[in-house]
Image: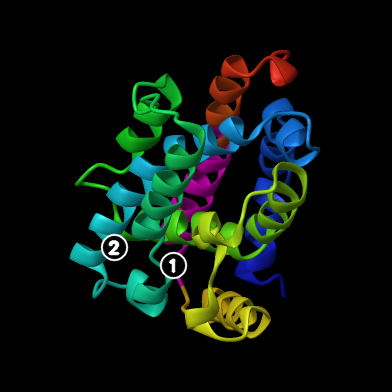
Amino acid sequence: MTTFHAQIKLRSDSAHREAEEAPFIAALMGGRLSPSAYLDYLKALAPVYLRMEELFTARGAEEPLSYFDHRALDRSQLIAADISYLEDVLGDSKNLTTLPSVGRYLDSLHNEITTTRLTAHHYIRYLGDLSGGQAIARLVARHYQIPAEALNFYNFEDIGDVVFYKKRYRDFLNLIALNEEQQEEFLSEVELLYALNRELFIDLGNLHSAAADTH
């Protein structure tokens, strides 16, 4: 029997790969941009996490989100601290909340979003931060000399063993027995979120010449 997590991976594999292969993120992780590009990446994500975590706080007792919501995962204040540190060093003050992709991402986090779709946001962002996000942290530290003081975003020491946490998360996804309608809601939201991430990377690529060829 195919597990629900396996269904997620199968359904979203193409969209996930397209997001990961966006020129901006490839250039950032390959050391071909600058510390300011990493700062812009954080500034584009900051309003998304702030809005997302407001919804998690308000609706964390609702199923299926209640199985996964864990305040130690919150990133918004940590992203804000990293942005403040890097702006002090780089003197950067661009406002990226006006990027079209940020607006579309925020639109997906509307007040009427179903709890199942909101749980998909939880899964995509936090499991991504615990997985590929750790590689981003290592690479930006190496390529751009970003110090640990500006990498709080990727520090999950409060949840303990990250490998165990991710396994338990996936196990819960397989055990909570979403009905067919909920499963489809979750899967379609995952596909949307990978598309929104790719759009975000395209917008960021348009700001940075080393990743200008984004189409």
| Foreground label between 1 and 2 | 2
User: Is 76 one of the magenta-colored residues?
Assistant: no
- Vertical side of 202 occupied by 193: above or below: below
Residue that mark 1 sits on: 179
Image marks 1 and 2: residues in contact by CB distance under 8 Å = no
Q: Whole-percent x and y of residue 144?
A: 70, 42
At a point 46% along the width and 51% down the height, the residue shown is 82
Q: Whole-percent x and y of residue 61?
A: 24, 75
User: Is 190 one of the magenta-colored residues?
Assistant: yes
Check disc 2 and give the amino acid type: Phe
Q: Disc 1 or 2, which lies upstream in sequence?
A: 2
The dot on residue 56 is: 2
Left or right: 201 with respect to 68? right
Neighbor class of circle 1 (other Cα within 10 Å; few <14, some 14-19, many 20+) is few
Please identify the quarter of the rendering in which residue 69 is found: bottom left
Magenta span: predominant SS is: helix
Check disc 1 and give the amino acid type: Asn
- Vertical side of 144 occupied by 142: above or below: below
At a point 50% along the width and 45% down the height, the residue shown is 188
- Vertical side of 17 occupied by 60: above or below: below
Residue situated in front as seen by the camera: 198 or 42? 42
Please report the bounds of the magenta region as a residue range: 178-195
Please identify the quarter of the rendering in which residue 199 is found: top right
Q: Whole-percent x and y of residue 191?
A: 56, 42
Q: What element carries label 1?
A: loop
Q: Kindly tell me whether residue 70 is visible in this rendering.
A: no
Residue situated in front as seen by the camera: 208 or 13? 208
Left or right: 141 with respect to 196? right
- Vertical side of 209 occupied by 41: above or below: below
Q: Whole-percent x and y of residue 60?
A: 27, 70
Neighbor class of circle 2 (other Cα within 10 Å; few <14, some 14-19, many 20+) is many
At a point 66% along the width and 55% down the height, the residue shown is 137
